[in-house]
Image (cartoon, rainbow, N blue to C red):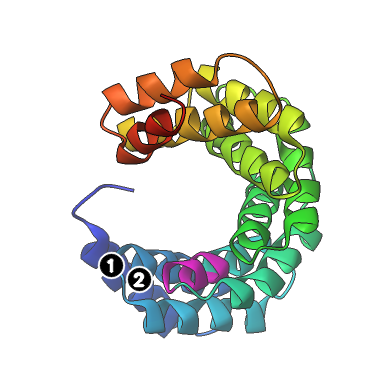
Amino acid sequence: KEKGKEDEAKRALSRAIEKFERHALAYERRGYVNFLLRNYTDAIYDYSKSIDINPNNADPYLGRALVRLAQDQVAEALPDLDKAIKKSIPLQPIYWKARRLKGECHLRLEEYDKAIFELKLFTKRLFSSDNPNYWDRRQAFFDYGRALMAKNDYDAAVEAFSEALKLDGESNQSQEIEELLFRGIAMQKAGKKGFEKDWKEAASLGSKRAEELLQTIA
């Protein structure tokens, strides 16, 4: 968990595996370290070994899915996310993380109905501030809005984007621009007022796309 000590952690975990080669947890943890170090081939090996030894632990399935996503292997990540969901329960943070990531995968694969199903479940869930999923709600609402837009459900998309904009969460200026831009588009398509204001704000933050959209209504 200490930044800069990943190599030291990897050596310690390797020693544990040398002493007990069927140490499922050590393989899972070393897989995580390799993932942090972007040693993706080694990470896949470690997570797979952990699963072979103990197929009932959700963590290595989620870990292997994250490696697949880092490699842009979206479809390949889905079976592991399904396993992570099945091997955990809704009281565990990993269950909801896997559901959110599954929704993100379906969105990226343009499987919008499946994405809506997963992301609706996640966005309806109440997370306490000490739950790691609490900080992913903003991204989940944004992804949910995009999936709804793809199905032409613009009113619901506006609500989702509005929730994203008012929530705490991992965000940066580029994401805020996208939230404003997409909410404006959804509002316009839903026949609602206020889309111009969103585009102006996005344009003021540096969005070229928002500037172009404003020119179409000038």
What distance separates the C-alpha of mark 1 from that of mark 2? 5 Å
User: For the magenta stretch, what is the residue range?
Assistant: 64-71
Q: Crowdedness of circle 1 by 10 Å Cα count: few (<14), some, many (20+)?
A: some
Is 127 in front, or is 162? 162
Q: Crowdedness of circle 2 by 10 Å Cα count: few (<14), some, many (20+)?
A: many
Answer left or right for 164 relative to 151.
left
Above or below: residue 61 compared with residue 103: below
User: Amino acid type of disc 2?
Assistant: Asn
Task: Provide the major secondary structure of the magenta segment.
Answer: helix
Q: Position of residue 134 (x, y in %)?
A: 57, 30
Q: Residue at x 56, y 29 (%)?
A: 183
Is 12 in front, or is 205? 205
The verdict on residue 81 being magenta is: no
> Dot 1 corresponds to which residue?
37
Q: Residue at x 57, y 82 (%)?
A: 48
Q: Residue at x 49, y 32 (%)?
A: 179
Residue 120 appears in view: yes
Q: Position of residue 150 (x, y in %)?
A: 69, 49
Residue 20 appears in view: no
Q: Where's the C terminus, which quadrant?
A: top left
Residue 34 circle label? 2
The verdict on residue 70 being magenta is: yes
Is 61 in front, or is 14? 61
> Which quadrant of the view contains residue 173?
top left
Answer left or right for 184 relative to 29.
right
User: Amino acid type of disc 1?
Assistant: Leu
